[in-house]
Amino acid sequence: MNPIFEHALKVRDYECDTQGHVNNANYQHYFEVTRHEFLEKVGLNFHELHLQGIDAVVSRVEIRYKVPLIGMDLFRCTVTRLERVGVKYIFHQEIIRERDEIVCAKAKIEVVNLVSGRLSQPVLFDQAFRDYIG
């Protein structure tokens, strides 16, 4: 399946633990930066939205770690699928190591929208994501 979006990244040495693997918490950073880049692609700026009182916030994260990334690995973080369930958007994401095309991690990340601090229907996001929701 072709991803609907992908972002190229490189492991930095300080992201690794004593074992030489990327620390598990950093995978969440990779997934998040990719979602923010995806927002930019569809015309939404995370910071500008916040200044307007609109916040997309993570409500649930599920990550399956498969093969560890190590220092200096080049990889792609993808959004493979996007779905809407009620007021939630569910981002299905993968991290793929460049040198051998191995899937290193998979994630299912649920995001909700707050407008002025209150849970709201994601109308603005519905418009921006209309070509990607499946």
Image: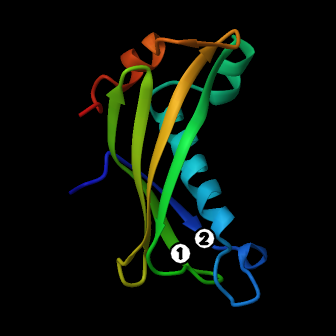
Residue 47 placement (x, y as % from top left): 70, 27
The answer to which of 87 and 133 lies nearer the viewer is 87
Q: Label for residue 23?
A: none
The kind of secondary structure element at disc 2 is strand
Q: Give the spatial CA distance, label 2 vs label 1.
A: 4 Å
Evaluate if marks 2 and 1 touch, with contact meaning CB atoms under 8 Å apart. Answer: yes
Question: Is the residue marked by circle 2 packed among few (<14), some (14-19), or many (20+) residues within 10 Å?
Answer: some
56 w.r.t. 62: above or below: above
In what quadrant of the picture does the C terminus appear? top left
Circle 1: residue type:
Leu
Q: Is residue 119 left or right of residue 18?
A: left
The image shows residue 112 at horizontal and vertical percentages of: 53, 26
Quadrant of the image containing the N terminus: bottom left
Question: In the rendered view, does 111 fall on the left or right side of 134?
Answer: right
Amino acid type, residue under disc 2 in the picture: Lys
Task: Report the residue at 65% width, 83% height from top.
Answer: 71
Q: Residue shown at 68%/73% (left/top)?
A: 23
**SS type, badge 1:** strand
**Where does label 2 land, which residue?**
10
Neighbourhood count class around disc 1 (C-alpha, 10 Å): few under 14, some 14–19, many 20 upward: some
| Numbered mark located on residue 74 in the image | 1
In the image, 102 versus 83, the foreground residue is 83
Q: Position of residue 37 (x, y in %)?
A: 54, 42
Give the residue displayed 38% in from the left and 18% down from the top: 126
Residue 65, percent from left and from top? 48, 71
